[in-house]
Amino acid sequence: MQKKKYNISVEATLEVIGGKWKCVILCHLTHGKKRTSELKRLMPDITQKMLTQQLRELEADGVINRIVYQQIPPKVEYELSEYGWSLQGILDSLCAWGEKHIKKVYGNTYDVLEENELNKHLMEERQ
């Protein structure tokens, strides 16, 4: 197997967490295990096919764990792996920068961000 060459190390990071949905999935998993249906509900704009693909890629890269429960009906949950938890600082920084960007462009976050568990702290600040 030929070794891969990167021009800059951020390319390796983006190869694992790049794209529109992977960081969103990872952010949701920082709040605990989630079933596929829960992730789909939290990200209504993602297609089922794309969600499945992104979960498989994150699992293949060792960033998330897929937990299969031997029961009927079958139950599958996803969680961050120990390796995936090492991304917490990056994810927190991306969220913080996004909040600043939204405030800069839109003036506030309340009209732009959906109310969900990831944005709970922003909604509480508003009150």
Image (cartoon, rainbow, N blue to C red):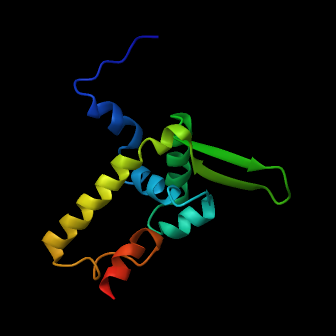
Q: Is residue 19 visible?
A: no
Q: Nearer the viewer, residue 70 or 85?
A: 85
The image quadrant of residue 96 is: bottom left
Looking at the rendering, in which quadrant would you find the C terminus?
bottom left
In the figure, is residue 21 to the left or right of 38?
left
- Residue 91 lies, in percent from the top left, at 37, 52
Report the residue that reaches farthest toward the top.
Answer: 1
Above or below, 74 against 101 in this view is above
Q: Identify the residue at horizontal 20%, vertical 65% (top origin).
A: 100
Q: Position of residue 36 (x, y in %)?
A: 61, 59
In percent of width and height, residue 12 lies at 34, 31
Does 69 sit left or right of 28 as displayed? right
Q: Is residue 65 above or below residue 20?
A: above
Q: Is residue 86 visible?
A: yes
**Count of number-bearing discs:** 0
- Residue at the spot 70% in from the left edge and 53% down from the top edge: 76
Instruction: Give the image location of residue 13, x and y in percent.
Output: 34, 36
With respect to residue 73, does 106 lie above or below? below
